[in-house]
Amino acid sequence: MSQEAEWIDQFAGLKRLPPDVVDILMRNSAVVSLPSGSRIYGPGQAPKSYLLLLDGSVRVQQISETGREIVLYRVSAGESCALTTACLMGYEDYPAEAIAETDIHAVAIPRTTFEELIARSHEFRRFVFTAFSTRVTNLFRIIEEIAFSRMDIRLAHKILELSHGADDVTSTQQQIASELGTAREVVSRIFAEFQRRGWLAVTRGHIKINNRPALERLASEH
Amino acid sequence: MSQEAEWIDQFAGLKRLPPDVVDILMRNSAVVSLPSGSRIYGPGQAPKSYLLLLDGSVRVQQISETGREIVLYRVSAGESCALTTACLMGYEDYPAEAIAETDIHAVAIPRTTFEELIARSHEFRRFVFTAFSTRVTNLFRIIEEIAFSRMDIRLAHKILELSHGADDVTSTQQQIASELGTAREVVSRIFAEFQRRGWLAVTRGHIKINNRPALERLASEH
DNA sequence: GGAAGTATGTGACTAAGTCACAAAGCCGGA
DNA sequence: TCCGGCTTTGTGACTTAGTCACATACTTCC
């Protein structure tokens, strides 16, 4: 129980749950582990429980018939698979694919327990709906980006995002292309231009940022 | 009250609500009317209540800085503004814009009542989450289309959708371009090609379908 | 009938995606 | 250590999509 009391602290939105609700949550949830690379949900693999991620990272993406991919969002430690849950509750098939990017630990809440928590607790509702709206807002942003933004701007943005403030990014061009839903050749050509300008140094599987302000300036153009 | 009892029948998912829940719903909701063209939500104009559309049609769209638009989805009579509501409950700003396409009548449920209904009724939760997952599924489909589909295929698809089974569509090329998030010139050129093939006849503000099977064949190429 | 406003067509150009293939880097085994 | 196979990256040639500028055509209404 003390171990369980620990995990709940990872979720800011759940800290204020009343004790009886915490009790229901604890009794009916389980901590699960999955190895890196496992497919958590996908078409024909409907979600069965609400997941709260304790550790690791989950990538949610769509794959086209021609094999091109686009990353819709990531679920990180301390977050929940909010949209999946909507599909779970609406009994709809989940049309995207969720892949564990690292080994992960998560709390699994069965559908019936999830419903009970929703019914009982204002705080839990708030937690769930806030997660929803964050994801939906983010999806809207992605649609806007794909439809209206230039690829060089999106790429500058993505490199800065992947760098986490450091100057080195370890990723292949194909992986970055998949993040953005474009073709590898396009990434290669834009990188060539960025290198020509002295903003980056690109080697196999690796990008070094040499002029962060320039990238930030370009990224902010949208 | 009999008038109110009528509107609830328009929503298949609400028919089985228990009487006490119906009572709460009736006491705390109001039927509102808005003229065609009114902006219902938008950035800086946060939703204040959950809307159930009785009559008319609402277009939810995004507008880029350069003025290009894209339609995300429509809310029709008998449906709810599900995504908006998530933002309402999550207290996040709604990043898209909802416009009444026709004069509309809708039932407005205040946030606090909405929460009470969610807490009390399994059927109401089911109704809300089903609407939610339908919208999210649809957003995923749009992202896939924008990112991976050819414009001629998307355009064929859209014309068939706008035709509602008839052979005439009344719409300007600019309106169709906005639906698809592309530029008017692109629509004009693809129409030129469709006309060359004898599939369409295009006049000012009007499209006549002359070869529906051909359009369907192209649209189904996905 | 003409003016103003709206809608459509088109050329020239840039950006992005596709296809085919070459070249370079990496890794493991002989 | 060197070689072969695999992965990653680069590039030319081409198609598709979006942008900009402007011409032309249709409508409406005075």
Image: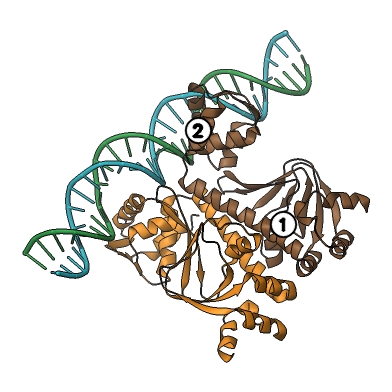
Chain colours: A brown, B orange, C green, D cyan
Instruction: Looking at this view, name the residue that lies furthest to the bottom.
Output: B2
Q: Are marks 1 and 2 in contact (CB under 8 Å)?
A: no
**Amino acid on which disc 2 is placed:** Arg
**Horizontal and vertical percent position of residue A103:** 79, 41
The residue at 56%/28% (across/down) is: A212
**Horizontal and vertical percent position of residue A34:** 81, 46
Label 2: which secondary element? helix
Q: Disc 1 sits on a residue from what chain?
A: A
Q: Quadrant of residue A24?
A: bottom right
The answer to whether A74 is drawn above or below residue C14 in the figure is: below
**Amino acid on which disc 1 is placed:** Gln
Q: Mark 1 Cα within 10 Å, few/some/many (few <14, many 20+)? A: few
Q: Which residue is mark 1?
A: A45
Instruction: Tell me, for residue A217, which label it has, or none.
Output: 2
A17 vs A194, left or right, is right
Where is the N terminus of chain A found, in terms of image quarters?
bottom right
First in sequence: mark 1 vs mark 2: 1
Mark yes or no: residue A183 visible. no
**Horizontal and vertical percent position of residue A170:** 66, 29
A123 vs A192, left or right, is right
Q: Disc 2 sits on a residue from what chain?
A: A
